[in-house]
Image: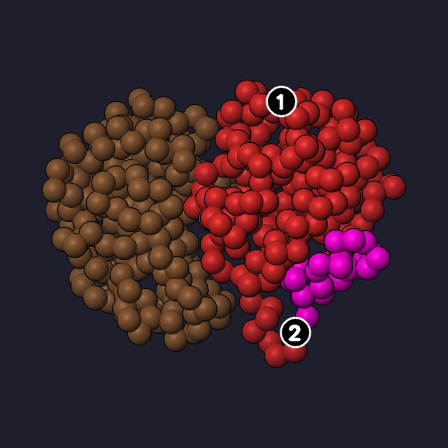
Amino acid sequence: MSILAVHPGASYHIESLEAPRYAGCFDRLVRPEDLPQVVLEDFSVVLIPCRTPADRMLEHAGRLRAYLDAGGTVIATGESDSGIFLPAINFTPQPTNFWWWLTPGADLGVRIAAPEHALFRRLEARDLAWHLHGWFDPPPGAEVLAVNESGNPILYIDEVSTAGRMVVTSLDPFYHHGSYFMPAATRFLDGFLPWMREELDAA
Amino acid sequence: MSVLFIHSHYGIDELLFQRHAEAGRVRLVRERNLDASHFAAASGLITTQHLDQVGLMQHAGSLRALLARGGRWIFNGHMARVLIPGLSVYVAMSNPRRADFALTRLADHPIFDGIDQQKLEEDMGVAGFYGRGHNPMPSDATAINGVGPRRLPVDWDWALPGGGRILSHAGNDFWHSGDDDALKQVLADRALAWVAGELGR
């Protein structure tokens, strides 16, 4: 099996998906408009990166749902309005305090909620702390991996809403890494993408 | 004819251009709906940091035709595809520090005339949004603003040999820079006027 990544084509997607640092993490890249030409069930994981325009994914919502119902895994990172094209996502935006780190000793408030999870053998809390864009109200039974300063989920795994698995976060690491603007976002991908390959592709 | 604004990012209205859109001076088109007729009907082009550059490659012929008939294009962001011969892909700074984000006016330009460039260096005290590198400049382009001690051309204006002009800004959309809302509107107004050929003839 293998990893399919949606490629919406912005400079930060090109840098994150095509440049040597992470290119080997994806077996195939597909334009949103070309999704009908791809058999999603051929892939273990479909990754939809941050800032994928939701109106370019909307027409594929049924196809994604069928893939999930067949046991597939979808990863959706932040600022893509994922609830428009994926099921059971309840999102509340929050103001983005991008200047929080200017205060000496400041803490954005991101916390790991499931330290025993395999992902956190590769990531520390500081690797999830750059900006906050909002939080989720996951369905009962979902596994919350990280929370914001108020204890609300910002990263979770939902294996109850469909027969498949959705890894959902409001963090936007592809945007920031691909914009050369946030070392923590790069550290996040340094841990998250190998975890994706080893744990989700091999599963 | 009006200026074409490719609206790439879903869920964010381009409020600084709203009244101009209502006046018919600029047409905002969702990227997914873009086709050749939009380029054919346009007098100029504005794109944002969120531009689908892979998708725009499919409109390269329309883009070249727009420039060849004297059209102007403001490009915001990092060039990751060579959309027009003569352009080059973005070069990021390596491990930049605060001093590397200092901005310097290098040449007069009607969009930036009378504007203190240092007011665009920081948003809420955070520097780097304006630019953290540069889109390499064609040899016959004019550098407008430099970034860092080496004054890398973060903004430049190029009169293409075959007609048309490109203003490249290698960062977040420049009219969103700084903390002064009035200044942001001035920059957006001037950007549109420049693309429309009303400034800097």
Q: Colour of chain B?
A: brown
Quarter holding the N terminus of chain B is top left
Left or right: A10 in relation to A90: left
Q: Is residue B74 magenta?
A: no
Question: What secondary structure predominates along the stretch shown in magenta?
Answer: loop
Q: Position of residue A140 (x, y in %)?
A: 87, 41
Name the amino acid type tagged 2. Ala
Residue at x-position 72% and y-position 35%: A73
Residue at x-position 18% and y-position 62%: B108
Viewer-side residue, A195 vs B43: A195
Q: Colour of chain A?
A: red
Viewer-side residue, B141 vs B93: B93
Left or right: A192 in relation to A152: left
Instruction: Name the secondary structure under disc 1.
Output: loop
Name the amino acid type tagged 1. Val
Q: Residue furthest bottom?
A: A104
- Residue picked out by circle 1: A39
Q: Residue furthest right?
A: A141
- Residue picked out by circle 2: A106
